[in-house]
Every structure is written in C-alpha cells, then in structure tokens.
Image (cartoon, coloured by chain):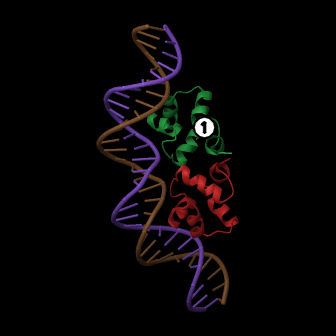
Chain colours: A green, B red, C purple, D brown
DNA sequence: TTGAAATGTTAGATATATATGACATTTTTA
DNA sequence: TAAAAATGTCATATATATCTAACATTTCAA
C-alpha cells in the first residue's frame, strides 16, 4: 500500500506523464500503484523526486 | 552511497547476521553496502526495519 | 604474529522487475 | 451520451536482482 497514486494525483499527472518523467513504461507505474510488484530502489527514488516528496512519504508505513 | 554499512555497524551486526535477519544472501548485503546494485523496495524496507531506522535515513540523500 | 572471522569478489544459475504491444474497461469531457 | 482519454490487464521478451558456491583478502583476537 504505497502512496504513489495519491501523490501523482496531487501533482496533476497522468500515469503516462509520470512514466515519461521517471523513464519507465506506463504499465510499470500502473503495477507499482496497484502493488503488483516490488520496484527497485532506483525507481523509488526517481518517483519520489518526480513527485516532490521522499522515500518515507511514498513507501514507508507508519 | 547508502548508509547500510554505517547503521549495521552501529547495530553491532556482521553482514552475515544482517543477511540472515532480512533473509537474503550475505553477498547481497555486501553488494548493497558497496553500491554494486539496486535493491528492491521490499529489501530496503526489511533492511530499515532490521536496523531500527527508516527508508530516508538509509537511502535518501540530502 | 598466527589463525579465525569478517569482508570482498567472481562465476554461473534462477527469479523477477521492467519493456513492448495490444486490447478491455473505466473515467472524463465535449 | 458519445468520443476521447486514462487506466487496468494480459502475453511475451529482456535486463537485472538475487542465489549458491567458492576463493582471496582484510581485520581482529588469542
């Protein structure tokens, strides 16, 4: 249960736009948002930067 | 440049002990500590918990 | 100052993250 | 409400994280 979708919405981005910004396929964003798999640290960091936040806010529970 | 080695030392653990705690091979810990690759988010979270810290402290720069 | 423990590193095998392409469904907008 | 845009999902392919095993080097205690 990460918060990528939530932060993406706040940033006003579509999955496609976010995918382009972090240089992955749109499907990859979709799968990450729906907890269908386990992204690499590198991708997590790129996502956090693209969404103007940090690792804890996106991926750390409690 | 993550801080896994630093936190592991503070916790008084060897690479082998930490590896066992987070259920990976010792070599995986070694490679992560030396930035030889890109761990999965899941492993990062297990490492943060095992070292009593969080994602930002271990892997977020600045 | 030797021997044991810890760490670094390599090679080959396997599991899985990620890509591409395609299509179905849902949501949004004209 | 129809068309367009966004999202969900599947299949196949590829890159790479992670495993095991082995050995070399460094660190540390007796």
Along the viewing direction, whichever of A23 and B43 lies nearer the viewer: B43
Direction from residue B12 to residue A41 in the image, left or right: left
Along the viewing direction, whichever of B10 and A38 lies nearer the viewer: A38
| Residue A59 visible here | yes
Please give the count of numbered marks on the rendered protein: 1
Residue drawn at the location 59% of the way across and 64% of the way down: B21
Q: Position of residue A13 (x, y in %)?
A: 55, 27
Q: Residues within 10 Å of mark 1 (few under 14, many from 20)?
A: some
Residue drawn at the location 50% of the way across and 65% of the way down: B25
User: Which secondary structure lies at badge 1?
Assistant: loop
| Residue A23 visible here | no
Q: Position of residue B2 (x, y in %)?
A: 61, 55
Q: Chain of mark 1?
A: A
Along the viewing direction, whichever of C1 and A21 lies nearer the viewer: A21
Q: Quadrant of the N terminus of chain B?
A: bottom right
Q: Is residue A41 above or below residue C27?
A: below
Residue that mark 1 sits on? A3
Along the viewing direction, whichever of D27 and A27 lies nearer the viewer: A27
Q: Position of residue B42 (x, y in %)?
A: 55, 51
Residue drawn at the location 60% of the way across and 40% of the way down: A48
Direction from residue B29 to residue C25 in the image, left or right: left
Task: Choose top left, top right, bottom left or bottom right for residue D11.
Answer: top left
Q: Position of residue C3 (x, y in %)?
A: 56, 89
């Amino acid at each position: 249960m990460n918060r990528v979708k939530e932060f993406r919405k706040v940033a006003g981005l579509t999955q496609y736009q976010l995918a382009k910004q972090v240089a992955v396929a749109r499907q990859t964003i979709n799968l990450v948002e729906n907890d269908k798999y386990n992204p690499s640290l590198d991708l997590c960091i790129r996502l956090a930067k693209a969404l103007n936040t940090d690792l804890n806010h996106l991926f750390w529970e409690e």
